Amino acid sequence: GELPVYFGIGYVRSEQNRVVVDEIDADSPAAEGGLQVGDTITAVDTDPVEGIDSLDSLLSLRAPGDVVAITVARSLSLSVKLGKPIDD
């Protein structure tokens, strides 16, 4: 189903159950937070990300305006303020 928050990653692919950022929407929470194409997302706050379903499950527990720590394989933790979903 639809996530209750807007993160702004257009496409991700899973390699060995890892989430790799393929595309980032311009001016999105992900872009504002400093994510880059090629980053591997390894955690949301302290919860490990073990694939795309895992990432979606963790984000589904959040609300627009929440600030989450997104850990990426660059060994950085980035602060991202989630937005409201955009109606298509």
Image: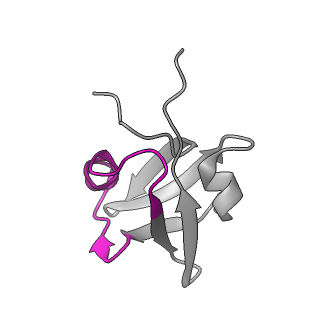
Q: Is residue 61 above or below residue 85?
A: below
User: At x 26% / y 55%, what residue is drawn?
Assistant: 54
Q: Name the quadrant of the N terminus.
A: top left
Quarter occupied by residue 23: top right
Q: Is residue 5 left or right of residue 62?
A: right
Measured from the top left, where is residue 38 in percent x and y?
A: 62, 62
Q: Give the residue displayed 44% in from the left and 56% down from the top.
A: 66
| Most distant residue in the top direction | 88
Any part of residue 83 in sight: yes
- Residue 76 included in the magenta stretch of the image: no
Q: Does the magenta portion include 63?
A: yes
Residue 83 drawn at (x, y percent): 53, 42
**Residue 85 vertical position relative to residue 53 in the rendered view, above or below:** above
Tell me the magenta residue range.
44-67
The one of 14 and 32 positioned closer to us in this rendering:
32
Along the line of sight, the residue nearer the viewer: 21 or 7: 7
Asked whether the viewer can see residue 36, the reply is no
Using the image, determine if residue 70 lies above or below residue 6: below
- Residue at the image position 57 percent from the left and 43 percent from the top: 8
